[in-house]
Image (cartoon, helix red, strand yellow):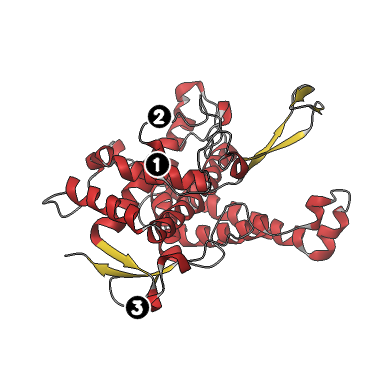
Amino acid sequence: MAGRSPVNLSAMLLSLSNETIARAAFGKGSAQQQRFLLAMKKLLEYLSGFNVVDLFPSWSFFGEISGLRHGMERVHLEIDGVLNEIIEEHEGKKFDGDDTNEDLVDVLLRIKRSGEMDLSLTMENVKAVLLDLFFAGTETSSTTLVWAMIELIRHPQVMQKAQLEVRKVLNGKIRIEEGDIHKLLYINQVIKETLRLHPPVPLLARRLCCETVELAGYTVPIESRVVINVWAMTRDPNYWEDPEIFQPERFEEKAIDFGVENFEFIPFGGGRRICPGISCALASMELWLAQLLFYFDWEISGGRSPQELDVEEAFGLTLTRKNDLCLVATYHE
């Protein structure tokens, strides 16, 4: 990875995120893993693209004419088929009694067979959990890390402080271990500030209003579908000092309870529908960012200044950078 040629960090981080979650879900060496990831990529492209039917639901015929409906149905069948093969593969495994070797599919199938936790799981439930895991945990994590690296490059003093912390904590070690993560306080602040300035999901999924309410002078009728603008909330000067400035130190003395008490900061959603994978996502992003900063020094190619690194965003379900991030990595001795 290290050298004078730029590396596509966006592609590498997305691959890392996909492979990590796929291994946790399906186990090591699943024959269908790559097929599933390719099918999920196609599905995300359909969901992220502009569709006139979203603006005019009554124009359902447009989905037929454009081929959108047919394309999505084809991808759905492909994903469903791959998941069926993965589940059949796991059902055919001989369990050796060592639950440390279980992946998520194994756990879900065990719960389904035994009726543990008073849950009545169907195969459709199992597939839905797997889809939720990939939707929520792949591109969101890699996107956050890309924005974190962009902001660190654009703010050399923050980069220096973060690298100094990692290398001080790991003094004498050759690799970062899980037990080191809780010591990386500034890395945690960098991740939080990145989530604030560049929330991976800028618009939370639509919520159905259960009763008519008055909100900020507006009447929201019952059964209205409400979209929450997370991007605007985290840049609101009423709640954040200098909201447009990347400043991880703002979290030094400000304890944040995502979506439970601090509803001005809900990158993982809030309330009963808050993302259940918060702890895992934060730990993974902190670990990966710490590894990038511990092993390598980073710079922009072509001798450009840090401020020349663009922050143009792309349209989609997730708030990705319009162009892939390519940086030069030099191995740190």
In the depicted view, which residue is nearer to us: 266 or 69?
266
Label 3: element kind: loop
**Badges 1 and 2: C-beta atoms under 8 Å apart?**
no
Q: Does residue 171 appear to the left or right of 63 in the view shown?
A: left
In the depicted view, which residue is nearer to us: 194 or 158?
158
- For disc 3, the neighbor class at 10 Å (few under 14, some 14 to 19, many from 20) is few
**Badges 1 and 3: C-beta atoms under 8 Å apart?**
no
First along the sequence among labels 1 and 3: 3
Tell me the amino acid under the disc marked 1: Leu
Residue at x 38% of width, y 61% of height: 153
- For disc 1, the neighbor class at 10 Å (few under 14, some 14 to 19, many from 20) is some
Tell me the amino acid under the disc marked 3: Ser
Residue 282 numbered tag: 1
Residue underneath mark 3: 5
Label 2: element kind: loop
Whole-number angstrom distance, CA of label 1 to CA of label 3: 30 Å
Residue at x 41% of width, y 60% of height: 154
Q: Quadrant of the C terminus?
A: bottom left
Q: Quadrant of the N terminus?
A: bottom left
Identity of the residue furthest to the front in this view: 242
Residue underneath mark 2: 255
First along the sequence among labels 2 and 3: 3
Is residue 96 something that shows in the picture? no
Q: Residue 283 location, x and y as percent?
A: 35, 42
Q: Residue 234 location, x and y as percent?
A: 55, 40
